[in-house]
Image (cartoon, rainbow, N blue to C red):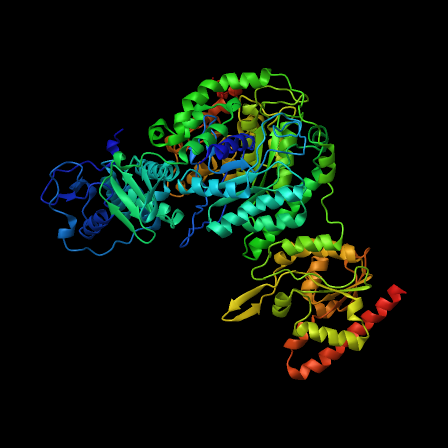
Amino acid sequence: MDAPDLFPPPEAVEGGSRTIHLRPGADLDGFRAALRRLVADDVPPDRVTWSAGDAPGLFGSSPGAEPDAPPVALPKPVAGLIPMVVPHRDRERYALLHTLVWRVRHGERHLTEVASDPLVHRLGGMRKAIARDLHKMHAFLRFRRIETAAGERFVAWFEPDNHILEAAAPFFVDRFRSMDWTILTPDGSAHWDRATLAFGPPGDKAQLPEGDGFEAGWRDYYESTFNPARTNLKAMRAEMPKKYWHNMPETAAIPGLVRAAASRTTQMIERAPQMTIKRDPAKAVAAMSDQAPKTLDALNAIIKRSEPLVPGATQAVLGEGRVGSTIAFVGEQPGDQEDRQGRPFVGPAGQLLSRAMAEAGIDREASYLTNAVKHFKFEERGKRRIHQKPTAGEVSHYRWWLDRELDFVAPKLVVALGATAVLALTGKSIPITRARGPFRFERLDDRFQGFITVHPSYLLRLPDEAKEEAYATFVGDLRRVAELGRELAG
Amino acid sequence: MDEALAKKLRILADAAKYDASCSSSGAPKRKAGKDELGSTTGSGICHAYTPDGRCISLLKILLTNYCLFDCAYCINRRSSNVQRARFSVQEVVTLTVEFYKRNYIEGLFLSSGIIKSPDYTMELLTRVAKSLRRDHGFRGYIHLKSIPEASPWLIEEAGLYADRLSINVELPTEASLQTLAPEKDGATILNAMAQVAERIVEAKAERRRFSPAGQSTQVIVGADATTDEALIRKSAHLYGSVGLKRVYYSAFSPIPEGSGILPLKAPPLQREHRLYQADWLIRYYDFSADDVADAADDGMFSLDIDPKLAWALKNRHRFPVDVNTGDREMLLRVPGLGARAVDKIIKARRHTRLRLDDVARLSSALKRARPFLIAADYTPGGLTDRLDLRSRLVEPAQQLSLF
């Protein structure tokens, strides 16, 4: 449908009028160059005739022959609209865009915001058509696989409505980067060799390989995922118009599916419920609700075979100690040494903890030691594995295991070593300095008493002059822990 | 593809088709790196449409349709005589990769019947996702249907590999669950959803990946006596409490091998459609659950007019709204004006006075909008309050299923 009021009335063609020849198809570069020249010379749209090479014999004077005009500053929405309209097959596309630019530069700077303006509305419709065409090409194109000497290669044939091959290709590069592929269209072809994207001459459907080993399976899937009780052909055709069907292998199934849909549905409705042939698997159903681990060993087996939920880690480091220990210590996460040896608190911080425990009169062998996070989170820098503090979310990933673990060990007193342990036990961030000493872990206080102190690795990081005093305070904390432990055990 | 695998595919695709969701949207944009396969574009692509008008964007299959549960509405319940099959982890991975490479799909939606135990099944689902990501550099979309009865640590792991986790509430009330899905428990389902919600929020704040496209759920419509109002209130509650991305409403569909406790009849498709419209009003049109309830009669939405129009007809004193001066909230309430049209109106009126013709270019449903708006050259006069307005706007009886 023509909209003659879109253009200013044509004036008598004088010497100032121009004809601009562009390449057939979507000549974005040519249009840009021409537009710059027209803007530089302030040529109004009614003085320009555009020829997109669609008519024969018009090649010859290309805009490249003229000297380059300076770039044109355009509002973003206009600059963004141009590449989305240029691929449109409408012969008036260049003239419409030029009119838009002219009006924007002559007093209607915000024209694109007036979506109700006839020109903006029409260009908006063209942009929408291109977006839809691109979307449908991305959706409905089907590759077929062929074997070549160099390995597998994928080939597709597609017929877009507009000149969109170049605009559509980057999507396929992003998605199928590790594949060699070719897309053939009546307009041109695109080739990707896992490194570069090249465009070539128009293709032919005959170049498409004969079949593909997965097409039958795909058709099976298409048929099986269809629900005959919901048949709605109008909705299907609105989104997948018939013009696409001949290049989509699955659509061959449509007539059969539609023909059988009514009778399949009636059968389902009319068929009386059947008695079940199979025996009611009472035992299996009962066993199903019995999946929770019953012992610490069973839980540990689950933790052991689970993948790390933090980046890094070669193995899970399980808690160590007796079930029924009076005191359980919870640290942050295994470190480098722990990860290598698969045992908790064996690195420098662990050794320091052992020493302090001994000085405070706590038997390490009679205590339970574990970590909030069961895997060593680290970042590799050169040959070193640098400890990374687990995030609150990562601590949450591991909280279920810690909960169950403490259930099984059933200590009377749990000592949180450092902020991460506190976070794991309370679900909250609590500053150690303020909470240090006996503490009620709200969520858990019916199960055991709590105590908060620093993590021994904190002591290792202190400057030498502060170390001694901090260590003495730490041992002091552990003495109170020992005392509490004796009271609770008694 | 060999016939044995094709046969499994037919059985396990058929078994999965009653899950309405096939959406692949909402994942952060990703591109394949060197030696990787797959991307996500943010908005999702429908690679094909079946004759039921529904989109295929993902390979939607069950790992197995053997199931120990006995949910009356489900074709795969243990007491059904349906044909059974089971994929290996490797088979699902192969199908996903090979279909993906041919541009048939843009990812996988994997669910499963419960075999051996919920934990055992959940571990298998996660292994598929893990293998795709690790062994095949797969960057496409993965939606895992989590099993709420599985141990919580398994959900923690699944979220690291999936773009979306979903847990189906299936039936909106505890009573219906007890009657129709005896092995399921409403509290277990909600706890699992809350766990996922919490982790998604944490991960987002920490810029880590955990189910980045959020979580969704499905509720079956028409298998029990729950009203539309109750369904919408339940959804509004879920959107608020566990931050759901979507609630899918699935009209209970007759299934081969139907159960004796459920009536077998054509699925209430128009009712499902109205529920989706009402759901949109809550998510995109600033309607509260009470507003939407106001659009219903005795808790049910009319089948012949959409809930937004129903609300407007009951609240005529708030119309007409002037398109050149009305605020966004009220413009969104004008029947026939979509959220996008409203945004365009607001932008355009900064530069021009909109006439009815202008509005016509921005809305495709001017007939419904006319009685409720004022433009520079138009007022509806007495039209807004006409007694027969409803009957003038009723959609012609539409046959949704074409036979």
Splitting the image into 4 quarters, where does residue B269 fall? Answer: top right
Q: Quadrant of the N terminus of chain B?
A: top left
In the current view of this chain or complex, which residue is farthest to the bottom? A465
Q: Where B72 sits versus A64, above or below?
A: above
Rendered image quadrant of residue A245? top left
Total marks in image: 0
Residue A190, image quadrant: top left
Q: In this view, does A464 lie above or below A174?
A: below
Furthest-left residue in view? A15
Q: Residue A161: where, in percent of width, then height?
A: 30, 34
Q: Residue at x 22, y 42 (%)?
A: A201
Q: Position of residue A399 (x, y in %)?
A: 68, 55
- Front position in the image: A485 or B307: A485
Q: Residue A147: image x %, image y %?
A: 34, 43
Depth check, front residue: A471 or B352? A471
Q: Is residue A81 visible?
A: no
For the point 65% across and 46% down, which residue is it?
Answer: B194
* Residue lying at the far right of the rendered structure: A490
Q: Is residue B131 left or right of residue A360?
A: left
| Residue A350 in sight | yes
> How far across and down, in percent of the image, does residue A275 sit?
67, 20
Left or right, residue B223 beside residue A413: left
Q: In this rendering, would A23 be left or right of B92?
A: left
